[in-house]
Image (tube, helix red, strand yellow):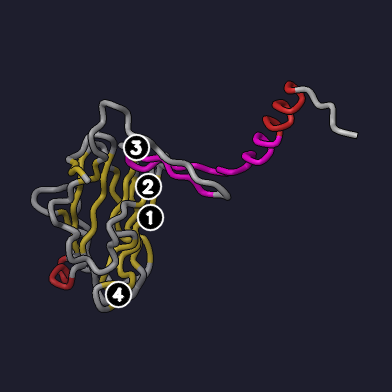
């Protein structure tokens, strides 16, 4: 005997099946530089609004161009009061890198620079007249320098003894910083 389902019952069944199928697809989402991404079993994408012509990324002005462990991504650590950047991680032919090499934090975030004890003595020094200066080179394991960022912008820094090897990093603070179109 043929099914006697009504159109309403058929549409309701399809709608319920679709809702159940999509449930849990995007367990957790993160926004980096205004671009939505998702983790979990599904994906989320961001479509540019009609007024947006291109997405933009922080403009490091070539500072990270030859940094061995920089892959073009900025680690989003916004929403935290304190974050850690390791000093002396693997990169640039030894333990001559910062990990992660590029981070994005909120205004008011304290960055703890934690020495790994590898790669010899290191420093954290801003490019130009920037605020970062950890003082004399240190080789001991542990947090040896910290700084709280109070002004939006991009803060490029390096390790004095290992800058020529490519031991450089950048911190993007807040929402107002130079960008480049992609």
Q: Dot 4 surroundings within 10 Å: few (below 14), some, or many (20 or more)?
A: some
Q: Residues within 10 Å of mark 3 (few under 14, many from 20)?
A: few
Q: Distance between the residues labelled 1 and 4?
A: 17 Å
Residue farthest toward the front in the current orientation of the protein: 1
- Establish if 12 lies above or below 43: above
- Residue 28 as seen in the image, left or right of residue 83: right
- Residue on which the image places disc 1: 84
The structure residue drawn at horizontal position 28% and vertical position 78%, both measured from the top left corner, is: 94
- Marks 2/3: CA distance? 11 Å
Q: Residue 76 carries which label?
A: 2
Asked which secondary structure carries label 2, the reply is strand
Name the mark on residue 95. 4
Numbered disc in front, either 2 or 3:
3
Marks 3, 1: nearer the viewer: 3
- Residue 88 rendering spot, x and y as whole percentages: 30, 70
Say whether marks 1 and 4 touch (CB < 8 Å).
no
Q: How many labels does the image show?
A: 4
Q: Residue at x 23, y 58 (%)?
A: 169
Q: Residues within 10 Å of mark 1 (few under 14, many from 20)?
A: some
Q: Residue 34 carries which label?
A: 3
Label 4 sits on a secondary structure element that is strand
Residues at circles 1 and 2 in contact by the CB criterion of under 8 Å: no
């Amino acid at each position: 005997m043929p099914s006697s389902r009504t159109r309403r019952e058929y549409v309701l069944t399809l709608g319920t099946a679709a809702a159940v199928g999509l449930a849990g697809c995007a367990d957790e989402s993160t926004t980096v530089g205004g671009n939505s991404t998702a983790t979990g079993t599904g994906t989320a994408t961001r479509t540019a609004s009609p007024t947006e012509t291109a997405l933009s990324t922080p403009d490091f002005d070539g500072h990270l161009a030859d940094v061995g462990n920089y892959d073009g991504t900025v680690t989003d650590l916004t929403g935290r009061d304190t974050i850690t950047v390791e000093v002396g991680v693997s990169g640039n032919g030894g333990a001559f890198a910062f990990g992660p090499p590029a981070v994005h934090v909120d205004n008011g975030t304290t960055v703890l620079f934690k020495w790994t004890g590898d790669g010899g003595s290191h420093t954290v020094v801003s490019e130009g007249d920037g605020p970062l200066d950890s003082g004399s080179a240190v080789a001991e394991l542990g947090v040896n320098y910290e700084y709280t960022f109070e002004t939006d912008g991009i803060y490029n820094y390096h390790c004095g003894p290992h800058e020529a090897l490519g031991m450089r990093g950048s911190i993007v603070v807040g929402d107002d910083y130079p960008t480049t179109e992609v």
